[in-house]
Image: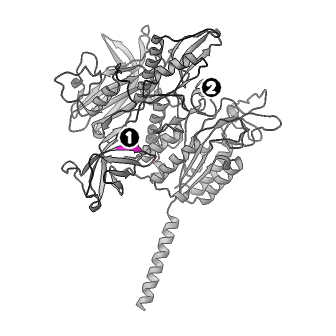
């Protein structure tokens, strides 16, 4: 009898476990990526297939099973194929599931047509399927293979009904639907087109009554939570970026993969988006990623996996080489350093590390670590790695030479090839040296231009004339590239929004109106950053005019709630790539910029002057005074410099005639510094 009861109990246990497994929320995903379009479509080739590897690795790091991640690539992703794949996703979904939908490819606007004319601007946004055409044809193509936002919205609504109020849906669109034509499209790879699918003479019916009647975010039944993140605003093209191996990858894809693979604490979609936006605008300062939906909800319905501060070592290549289960999506780059401890170690301060090593090769989700000395007894112990420094990558800039004159091309190539951080004529360039004829005056100039059309250097270059560049002009071209490289590298420097370093330090930016009262400027009418945010989600300040008694501005407030002194510095990277150290100020020591425990520092009001465009400020919080004003500016009594100070001054010192500057940068101790970015636009005062 006991055997029968025992067998019955086991059966009940297995049955209960099966029921539990069936009722537990699943994490499921669909990734659609189109790199090469149907040959006659007119669409240019993208790096979208690289995106699949990154999104998949990021989702696996968040507990998604590989069998639950469906992918649709290239010629599979016709419109009919996309519809079937989304229908399969809906069929697989159950109550309470966590669902991610990711699209990488082109986007385009399509004229809003009956019977569902519901767009306020007269155009539907659409995802461009493999078999969709770039241009309207009254006989052959009227947009029938474009997957419009109305069609996608209907599918997503059905999906939300399926997963219900306890489910969570994240939609990522690494495409764009419109944008202004720029020369940047000749330099870098852009996703999307400024050309809409519309019949000749189409006149959009823009009426208030037709505005956005089918808004999937305004569902009265509050079905599942829905958050949508797109790579750029509606009026912009979406430019690809490059990964650590300089391969093209979608900017949103790369930023999302890094952000979701490095979760350090409690995180909602607001914090996740700040991490994504910080990365994208560090790479592409002119691009404005967007987020819609209930952004205060927790990421993945709260079912996310935090990143451990240590890594278990399970695979050794030999006594000096280990496979590390961390890669570029975890912001690991060559040069990052780590220490090995026995797996049971808790107190790292009092324990001598078993070995010290450095990352020597980096993949997407794994890397290779090389120890300084062999660890001969590795087979008898289990180890974990603690990263103690972070490398921020390199300063490589890719330059395209778009000239036909062989002599000038040779001269430019000879000059620029001396510098390791400059790579020439590789795909997806950052800058281009090209002739440009201004249509307003028909005058041609030779320009060094960035992907956002900003001109870094130029000189007269008459058409059909014998032109050449002097040594001085070649030197100016190189210096402009160097300045761009430095500024671009610094724009990307920031700590994650959920970084646990200096948790007791609170930094606030308080905008308002700056008015001179007596001899000093004061911030009056204090407001919030939300009040200064434009429709694209960017903070915006009007330029200062001396003739005006009141101007836009802000103060920086730093409160130290901890038990130890902290120090702060301020870097300013301007729209024209100029870099300035604002704090420490001239004639003041770095040690004066200190906040003692329990106290609050508030800066003098800061007002803004041209150049117009996107400005990046970096507030650096450190344990020791930090002087970034140059390698010779340190006081002899200042003491030992931090790893960041050494990194900064070594990275940005001028190249001598005997040293042509590499593309590698040093490593920074992780617990030494927190870098808080503040990005805003400077606009004309009307």
Q: Earlier in the sequence, mark 2 or mark 1?
A: 2
Residue at left offset 63%, top offset 43% = 34
Q: Determine which quarter of the picture holds residue 580.
A: top left
Q: Which residue is mark 1?
A: 334
Query: Magenta stretch?
Result: 359-364
Graded by Cα atoms within 10 Å as few (under 14), some (14 to 19) or many (20 or more), the crowding at tag 2 reads few
Residue 573: x percent and y percent? 41, 23
Viewer-closest of 97 and 648: 648
Q: Is residue 483 magenta?
A: no
Where is residue 538? Give x, y as percent: 49, 29
- Residue at 64% from the left image edge and 11% from the top image edge: 463
Q: In the current view of this chain or complex, which residue is farthest to the bottom? A: 1
Is the residue 460 above or below the residue 315 in the image? above
394 with respect to 399 (left or right) = left
**What kind of secondary structure does the magenta stretch mostly adopt?**
strand
Q: Which residue is mark 2?
A: 180
Q: Of residues 71 and 564, which is closer to you in this image?
A: 71
Q: Residue at x 46, y 84 (%)?
A: 8
Label disc, if present, on residue 461 of the rendered structure: none
Q: Is residue 496 above or below residue 12?
A: above
- Left/right of residue 70 with respect to residue 598 in the rendered view: right
Q: Is residue 362 magenta?
A: yes
Q: Is residue 225 visible?
A: yes
């Amino acid at each position: 009898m006991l055997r029968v009861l025992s067998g019955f109990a086991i059966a009940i246990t297995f049955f209960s476990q099966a029921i539990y497994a069936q009722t537990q929320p699943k994490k499921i995903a669909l990734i659609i990526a189109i790199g090469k379009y149907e040959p006659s479509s007119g669409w240019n080739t993208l790096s979208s297939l690289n995106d699949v590897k990154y999104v998949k690795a990021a989702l696996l790091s968040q507990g998604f099973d590989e069998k639950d991640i469906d992918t649709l690539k290239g010629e599979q992703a016709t419109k009919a194929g996309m519809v079937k794949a989304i229908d399969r996703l809906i069929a697989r979904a159950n109550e309470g599931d966590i669902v991610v939908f990711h699209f990488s490819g082109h986007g385009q606007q399509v004229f809003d047509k009956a019977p569902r004319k519901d767009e306020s601007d007269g155009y539907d946004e659409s995802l461009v399927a493999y078999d969709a055409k770039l241009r309207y044809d009254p006989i052959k193509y009227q947009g029938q293979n474009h997957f419009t936002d109305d069609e996608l919205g209907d599918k997503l609504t059905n999906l939300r009904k399926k997963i219900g109020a306890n489910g969570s849906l994240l939609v990522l669109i690494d495409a764009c639907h419109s944008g202004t034509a720029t020369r940047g499209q000749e330099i870098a790879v852009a996703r999307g087109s400024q050309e809409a699918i519309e019949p000749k003479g189409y006149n959009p019916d823009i009426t208030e009554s037709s505005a956005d009647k089918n808004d999937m975010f305004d569902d009265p039944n509050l079905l599942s939570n829905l958050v949508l993140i797109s790579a750029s605003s509606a009026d912009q093209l979406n430019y690809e970026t490059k990964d650590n191996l300089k391969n093209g990858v979608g900017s949103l894809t790369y930023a999302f993969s890094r952000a979701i693979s490095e979760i350090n604490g409690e995180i909602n979609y607001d914090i996740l988006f700040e991490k994504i936006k910080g990365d994208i605008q560090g790479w592409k300062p002119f691009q404005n990623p967007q987020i819609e939906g209930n952004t205060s909800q927790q990421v993945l319905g709260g079912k996310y996996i935090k990143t451990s501060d240590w890594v278990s070592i399970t695979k050794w290549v030999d006594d000096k080489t280990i496979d590390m289960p961390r890669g570029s999506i975890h912001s690991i780059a060559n040069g990052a350093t780590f220490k090995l401890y026995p797996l049971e170690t808790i107190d790292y301060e009092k324990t001598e590390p078993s070995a010290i090593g450095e990352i020597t090769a980096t993949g997407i989700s794994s890397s290779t670590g090389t120890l300084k000395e062999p660890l001969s007894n590795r087979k008898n112990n289990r180890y974990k790695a603690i990263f103690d420094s972070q490398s921020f990558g390199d300063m490589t800039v890719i330059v395209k030479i778009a000239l036909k004159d062989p002599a000038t091309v040779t001269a430019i190539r000879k000059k620029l090839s001396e510098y390791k951080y400059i790579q020439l004529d590789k795909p997806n360039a950052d800058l281009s040296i090209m002739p440009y004829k201004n249509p307003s005056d028909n005058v041609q100039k030779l320009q060094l231009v960035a992907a956002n059309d900003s001109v870094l250097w130029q000189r007269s270059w008459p058409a059909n004339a014998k032109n050449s560049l002097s040594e001085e002009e070649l030197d100016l071209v190189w210096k402009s590239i160097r300045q761009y490289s430095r500024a671009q590298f610094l724009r990307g420097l920031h700590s994650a929004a959920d970084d646990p370093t200096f948790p007791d330090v609170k930094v606030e930016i308080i905008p308002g109106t700056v008015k001179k009262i007596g001899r000093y400027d004061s911030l009056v009418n204090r407001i919030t950053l939300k009040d200064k945010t434009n429709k694209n989600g960017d903070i915006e300040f009007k330029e200062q005019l001396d003739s005006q008694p009141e101007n836009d501005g802000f103060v920086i407030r730093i409160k130290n709630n901890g038990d130890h002194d902290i120090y702060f510095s301020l870097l300013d990277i301007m729209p024209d790539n100029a870099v300035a150290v604002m704090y420490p100020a001239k004639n003041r020591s770095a040690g004066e910029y200190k906040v003692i425990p329990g106290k609050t520092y508030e800066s003098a009001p800061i007002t803004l002057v041209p150049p117009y465009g996107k400005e990046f400020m970096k507030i650096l919080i450190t344990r020791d005074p930090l002087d970034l004003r140059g390698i010779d500016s340190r006081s002899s009594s200042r003491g030992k410099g931090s790893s960041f100070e050494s990194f900064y001054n070594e990275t940005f010192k001028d190249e001598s005639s005997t040293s042509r500057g590499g593309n590698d940068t040093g490593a920074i101790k992780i617990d030494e510094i927190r870098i808080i970015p503040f990005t805003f636009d400077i606009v004309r005062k009307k």
